[in-house]
Amino acid sequence: MATAGKVIKCRAAVIWEAGQIPSIEEVEVAPPRTHEIRVKIVATGICRTDDHVAEGLFPDINYPVIVGHEAAGIVESIGPEVTSVKPGDKVIPLCLTQCGECASCQNPKTNFCLKSHFYQPQNLMPDKTTRFTCKGKQVHHFLWTSTFSEYTVMPESSIVKIDNAAPLEKVCLFGCGFSTGYGAALNSAKVEPGSTCAIFGLGGVGLSVVMGCKTAGASRIIGIDINKEKFAKAKELGATECISPNDFDKPIEKVLVEMTGFGVDYAFEVIGRTDTAVAALASARLGSGTCVLVGEPPSGSQLIINPRLILTGRKLKGSMLGDWKLKEAFPKLVSDYMNKRCHPEALISHTLPFEKIAEGFELLRAGKSIRCILLF
Ligand code: CND
Ligand code: ZN
Ligand code: ZN
């Protein structure tokens, strides 16, 4: 392409400091370096994790920063030594890398690639520099994806090529929300047919857990949310019952234990709070229940749990990106979508032009959107 090797000027949403909603700016995006790829983002969803950065809940983040991690786009140009994609390919960014070579990538039991941003200065590219500048200032990356920019640069381990026939404005949801929730049910919990599940939080990720529990054949899927406007969609996607903690004068875990006898087989925390994480664990079945933490509480928070909950046989585990090895999983999930075997598009409640990103954040904060897709 004519732009290859050159600095590109384009639109991006920059969060200048913690507590600020992203503002649209013109940024310069440097060409990709060795093992890097520059991508033209076509569609990107707003996940609560992006909003947590805007709110300043992750104090370890450096500002200014360009967030965004749920997206799909087209390769614009590749840096030296890139072999897995070429310009023009449709791709999905991976917010958890799969380098294919480290001990974790070789281990079928984990998706936690050891060469990811979790082990490096997370707001910089692997070579510890940035590709973005705005008004003469260096702007930071986020999760090595930074998809709230028309063009972004990513390491090759953070990108996978998908079917060129895939509609990017739908399959962008595989980038985080859908895969995270769906995989939490299928891979992390390994929900079994006939089991009982409780999902705390019915946002984009929680509803994807609901879809995963349904696919796995759970017989009872209980949705829990303080916003009752989320119930209709949850039921449409597979929840058999929905309850609000505000409707009871006793703790929600007691309600769930009474509803099920000894607790649910699988409980999922998909809000990002420590009190609901404890409630989810306590609502898991005595002796055999599993609680999966999916929501991300503010950094620095502590979980205080009664060890007896674990000693009496409950299991507590966490799940990142649905425990999928993303490079392998995304092309397969896209193919499942093309064959109508899964429905990430069910999460889309709003579609806006990229310029209206601030409105997208407001809709999420007001509890009015499930997933708002921004189109460039
Ligand atoms: P979203 O905000 O859309 O959904 C959260 C839901 O929880 C909303 O429907 C709220 O009404 C509801 N809620 C809030 N407080 C309570 C409460 N006290 N009791 C019951 N319900 C409540 O968020 P999302 O679905 O985009 O993301 C959910 C979480 O998952 C969030 O913490 C996000 O940061 C995290 C996440 C994790 C991962 C991962 O890989 N583990 C990836 N992406 C996002
Ligand atoms: Zn790896
Ligand atoms: Zn996310």
Image (cartoon, helix red, strand yellow):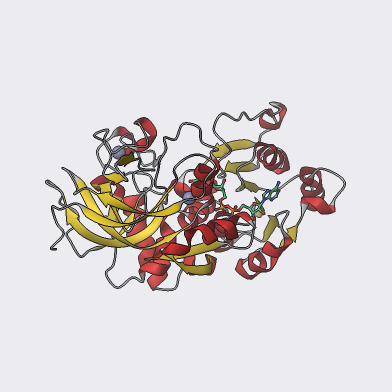
Picture residue at 29% right of the left edge, 42% below the top: 136
Image: 264 above or below 354:
above
Res 346 seen here: yes
Taking the view exactly as shown, the residue that stands out farthest to the front is 135
Q: Position of residue 225 (x, y in %)?
A: 70, 54
Q: Position of residue 229 (x, y in %)?
A: 70, 64
**Displayed quadrant of residue 133:** top left
Q: How many numbered discs? A: 0
Q: Which quadrant is home to the C terminus?
A: bottom left
Q: Position of residue 71 (x, y in %)?
A: 39, 58
Q: Position of residue 37 (x, y in %)?
A: 22, 51
Along the horizontal axis of the image, is 31 left or right of 144?
A: left
Along the horizontal axis of the image, is 109 left or right of 80?
A: right
Picture residue at 64% right of the left edge, 57% below the top: 366
Picture residue at 78% right of the left edge, 50% below the top: 245
Picture residue at 26% right of the left edge, 42% below the top: 100
The answer to which of 239 and 297 lies nearer the viewer is 297
Res 187 seen here: no
Q: Which quadrant is home to the N terminus?
A: bottom left
The answer to which of 198 and 192 lies nearer the viewer is 198
Image: 30 above or below 59:
below
